[in-house]
Image: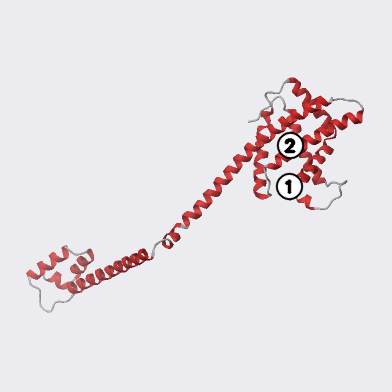
Amino acid sequence: MESLSHLTPIDREILNKSWGIVSKDMQQVAVNIFQMIFEQAPDAKLMFSFMMKDYKEDKKSNEFIFHAVRFLQVIESTMTHLEDPAQLDAVFLNLGKIHAKHEEQLGFSAHYWSVFKECVLFHFRKAMKSHNKFHKRNEMSFAEIDSAIILWREVLRFIIDRMKVGYSESGAIRKSNKQAINGQHSISGDDSGLSSGLSVETKQDLTQVKISAFSGRQHRTASTRHSLAYITATPAEPMTSSTCNFLKTLASMSPKCVRRRFSASPNARMHV
């Protein structure tokens, strides 16, 4: 993981000096960087609705300027906390999560960060050189400008690496959620998919089992009804004591419903 803890006091001095020059016209530098990003990655325009509108090259919309300045405000915050950039960790992680959301909804691609980095370095160098030329004196020597660009590359890499952590974490969560949803759909479809995966022979066997089970239930029901009819039928002749004893024995071995019907029979109670 990229860190800025290795920066020496001289490194920080060069960064602060170069930032002092760049930030004097931060809005114009930001607009130039933003414009160059769209030139290098035209498909990035699809992420910004205002880029679909026609505008003159010398007149940028307020939305364009607003988003361009936001790019450099992240760098400005880093410079403010250059001694301890870890204080901005929550900010970088949140920016990464936002870009992960943009990936799904607006088509953001992680390689845009590399484009952003190179465009920033190009215009930072240009701004420092222009400053020397405008003031007719070298506030920063060419060697210092080269050193500043090397250091700025490390700062930008640090910012992007921290954003990528939030980006990856959010992406992993979204992927896990999608898998969970797809898993639920798969489980709900198992019942319908089970019968479709059976062979013709298996389906026939299952059908025969169902028919046999149904026939067995019908047979048991008919037998029970026949037994009930036999027990509850009114006898043609008065029952003897041996007959009563036989019926009592049969009733004790029969289902409860048979017992109830037997006890309810007037002839049975009369001869007990």
Q: Nearer the viewer, residue 153 or 65?
A: 153
State the residue at coordinates (75%, 30%): 152
Query: Between marks 1 and 2, how big is the CA–CA gap?
Result: 15 Å
Q: Above or below — where is 199 with respect to 158?
A: below
Residue under the image location 80 percent in, 33 percent down? 124
Q: Nearer the viewer, residue 90 or 112?
A: 112
5 or 117, nearer to the observer: 117
Residue 179 position, x and y percent, is 53, 49
Secondary structure state at the residue bearing disc 1: helix
Tell me the amino acid under the disc marked 2: Lys
Answer with mark 1 or mark 2, whichever residue precedes in sequence.
1
Residue at the disc numbered 1: 44
Label 1 sits on what residue type? Ala
Q: Viewed as shown, does residue 101 lie left or right of 139? A: left
Q: Secondary structure at mark 2?
A: helix
Q: Place residue 24 in its image quadrant.
A: top right
Q: Residue furthest top?
A: 9
The residue drawn where x is 69% and y is 33% is 157
Res. 272 in view: no
Task: Rate crowding at label 2 as few (under 14), some (14 to 19) or many (20 or more) other CA atoms within 10 Å.
Answer: some
Residue 69 seen in render: yes
Residue 175 spot, x, y in % from top left? 57, 46
Q: Position of residue 161 (x, y in %)?
A: 66, 34
Q: Quadrant of the N terminus?
A: top right
Kindly identify which residue carries mark 2.
117
Residue at figure coordinates x 61%, y 42% from the top left = 170
Please give left or right for residue 42 compared with residue 254 in the image.
right
Q: Left or right of 192: which side holds 100?
A: right
Quarter of the picture containing the C terminus is: bottom left
- Image colouring: secondary structure
Mark identifier at residue 33? none
Image coordinates of residue 20 in percent, x first then y, are 82, 28
